[in-house]
Amino acid sequence: MESEWKKDLRTSTEAFQRLVWPAVSPLIQGGRLIVCESNMSTDLHRALDMHAGIDAWQVNESNGRMRGIASRVQFLPPAVCGWDTFTIRHSRVSGTKTEFQKRCEAADQATEGWLLPHLTIQAYTDKPPLALLSAAVVKTTDLLIYARKHEHENSRTTIYRKSTHNAIFLVIPWQNLLRDGVWVGVVRGEPISS
């Protein structure tokens, strides 16, 4: 029987491929999507996800290039519009390194060639994932720079913290990034009728 975690990952990956990618890809030069999360059986895909934060690859056949993408799809209950934020796991109760710490270290040592996703895409869909509510894309390094600059603040005017039972997340509203001059591509889905 499939674990709840694996089921959520599969649902998230399917929503990303079916709803998010078609909406966001025109903002970032289109191309073909290769998803790592659906191929976690290979050591390479598992390592890309766990150590580099790369959930998918954008392949542009016309110019012979590809780049890594970090993705997060969150499912919202009916009557909730998107939260329109990027969320990054900042710290864990266990002390285990988080995506924020790993990506910052890779960015700090970029001249050594450590991989990190070039783009970060966060999206919100209804639950079950039938329609896209909103999605945004940002350059990962721009997001990290902004998060580091404001990580010790706790105000919705920049970023804020959200605690779960085992982790603290930095929550960065898309509108605040845009207000402060960071490029963010935003798309909105069709309103859901009840």
Image (cartoon, rainbow, N blue to C red):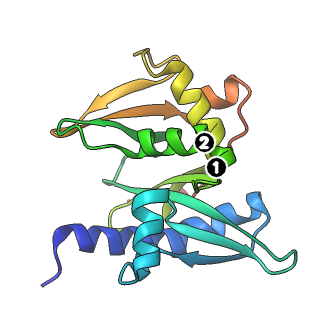
Is any atom of residue 172 visible in this view?
A: yes
Q: CA distance from mark 1 to mark 2?
A: 6 Å
Asked which secondary structure carries label 2, the reply is: loop
Residue 84 visible in the displayed image: no
Q: Residue furthest front?
A: 112
Where in the figure is residue 39, as x and y percent of width and height?
A: 42, 82
Label 1 Cα crowd, 10 Å radius (few <14 / some 14-19 / many 20+) = few
Asked if the residue under mark 2 is in contact with the one under mark 1, i.e. CB atoms within 8 Å, the reply is: yes
Viewer-closest of 123 and 144? 144
Q: Position of residue 148 (x, y in %)?
A: 52, 26
In this rendered view, identify the residue nearer to me: 5 or 117.
117
**Circle 2 residue:** 109
Q: Is residue 157 left or right of residue 187?
A: left
- Which residue ends up furthest to the right in the rendered image? 63
Residue 161 is drawn in which quadrant?
top left
Give the farthest residue toward the left. Answer: 1
x%, y% of residue 143?
Answer: 59, 37
Indicate the position of residue 43 as horizontal and vertical percent values: 40, 78
Question: Where residue 139 is drawn, which disc sits there?
Answer: none
Number of marks in the image? Answer: 2
Which residue in the structure is indicated by mark 1? Answer: 112
At label 1, the amino acid type is Glu
